[in-house]
Structure formats: structure tokens, C-alpha cells
Amino acid sequence: MLKTKAEPAEQAEEIRQVPITELHPFKDHPFKVLDDEAMLKTVESVARFGLLTPLVVRPRQEGGYEIISGHRRQHAAQLAGMKTLPVIVRQLDDDQAILQMVESNLQRETIRPSERAFAYKMKLEALKHQGARTDLTSSQVGQKLHGRTSRDLVAQEAGDNARNIQRYIRLTHLIPELLELVDQKKISFNPAVELSYLTVDEQRDFLQAMEDSKHSPSLSQAQQIKKLSRAGGCSYDAILDVITSDKKAQLDRLTLKNETIQRYFPKSYTPRQMEETILKLLEQWHRKRQRSQER
């Protein structure tokens, strides 16, 4: 049960052994726990040496503990067959818990764009609740925290800039299927930011067009699609036409390979000499054709 009185700091940092069944994931935390190669190595390490770093948790009103830091370690320990885990129990309100959860996970070496996007958004919301107000989608800001906006504060702590924080948060407007493609690097970050301004239906049309064409959008194409959306003309056909425009241009382009035409010229000829000769022959052919048509 959640205690009404906070424990002394030295007791709050005491390491306890808690049954693994009493540990629950942080609600709506954005960081994915995957059974990948890295997890396999973690499981092997935990099975051999135990859990060397305790989890950070907070009590839940409904019983048990909510994990603030250590979701991957908890999962690895569960796969390794451990029954109890070392934890540090802290008395934290929701905003404090969010801030600590985000900070602890942002220190990881590998962070997916979707994880970073939702982590930044959660942290900004928590800071707003604590007195720093910010508009998440524009550069206009309201009340400041110690002379700085919350977005500036997040940027400084993340070693980033406020504009990039804003751009990451835009990714949270993507439908899950498109966001997964960003994580898989099938859609680049900058085009994804532009696509986040499309409506849900337009994003689904884009997803279908991308699957049908097997073509990822460039930044300029994503910007064109965004303009179509603002103009009210962002249909499946219009999107498909934009993202296949490069392929159409390639089909319309004539390319003569050296190895194809080399046999018609002396071996000593350079590509420039071959080009000049071809142009002279074409000019002669063109003049002959004109004379023939005038007769």
C-alpha cells in the first residue's frame, strides 16, 4: 500500500529484494523491450552473475511496485528464471516518476526514433505540469521555467536543440505503421516529420501508395505531399504520382553506356570524342531528314 508519509532519504535508497511478480511496467512507457540479440546477451549475463544493478521502482496504490528504471533488466531476469530482484524504492509522484523514467532510458546507446519522440513528449508534459508551459507544435511559448522554456530544458539535457525536440515530437502524430517504418529506417527522419502533418486517412493512403510502388519518399517528395494535404488534394493517386516521379524521370532519360557503343569507335577514343562524333552524326541525320521532308 502507498504510504502517506515519505520515507527518509537513506531508507528510500535502501536496496530490497522484491518478488518479480510484484514488479509492473511503467504505464504507457515508450521504450520497447525486445527479445533481440542484445536481450539474449543480457539474459546470459544475468543467469551467470545475477542482477548487478538494482531496478528503481515506486509503490503502487493497488499493490506491488511500478518500474521506473530497469524494464529490460526485469525482462531478462524473468527469462533467466529469477524469482526476486534487487530494487530501490522511491516515493515519487507521477511527474517525478515520468522524468526519472525518461532520463534513465535516454542514457541508452541505441534509442529508436519512436522511443525518443514519445519520451520527449512525456517529459515536456511532466515539466508543464510542474509549471513550465509550452506549445508542443509551435515556437510560441508561454510561462518559462527559470528563464527557459521546458523545450529548451529538455534540449539542453538531451544534448540537442529545441527545434529538433519539436521535430521528434511531430513523429508522435504518425500512425503506428508509418512510425514502425521510421524505426526500421525505411522512411528517413526528415521526410517522416513532413508526413506527420497529414491526416490519419492521408497517412493510410500514403502507406498504401508506398507499399504499391515499393518506393520510399525523399524529403522533397514528402514536402510536396504535405502541400497537397494543405491544399485538400492529397489522394492516393496524387501521392502515388509524387513518389513515383523519380522513377518516371529515369524511364524518360536516355543513357548510353560506354561498353555498349565502344565497339563502334577506335579503342583510342575517349568518352568525350565518342560524344562529339555521335552528335555530328545526329546533326547530319537531322539535316538529311529535313531535306527529305521538304521535297
Image (cartoon, grey):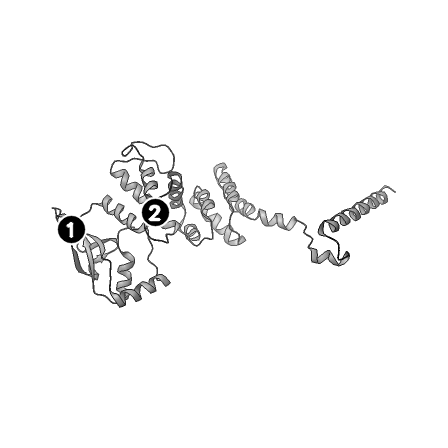
What residue would you read off at disc 2? 118
Find residue 12 and name its label. 1
In front: 155, or 129?
155
Q: Position of residue 172 (x, y in %)?
A: 38, 45
Q: Residues within 10 Å of mark 1 (few under 14, many from 20)?
A: some
Residue 59 seen in this snapshot = no
Task: Say which element carries label 1.
Answer: helix
Q: Position of residue 91 (x, y in %)?
A: 17, 48
Q: Position of residue 185 (x, y in %)?
A: 45, 53
State which tag comes first along the sequence, 2 or 1.
1
Report the quarter where the C terminus lies.
top right
User: Looking at the image, is mark 2 or mark 1 nearer the viewer?
Assistant: 1
Which residue is at a point 49% across and 51% down the rendered structure image? Answer: 208
Exactly how many numbered labels are in the figure? 2
Q: Which amino acid, by three-letter code, is at mark 2?
A: Phe
Q: Which amino acid, by three-letter code, is at mark 1?
A: Ala
Rendered position, 135 above or below 185: above
Rendered position, 165 above or below 43: above
Residue 221 is left or right of residue 288, and the answer is left
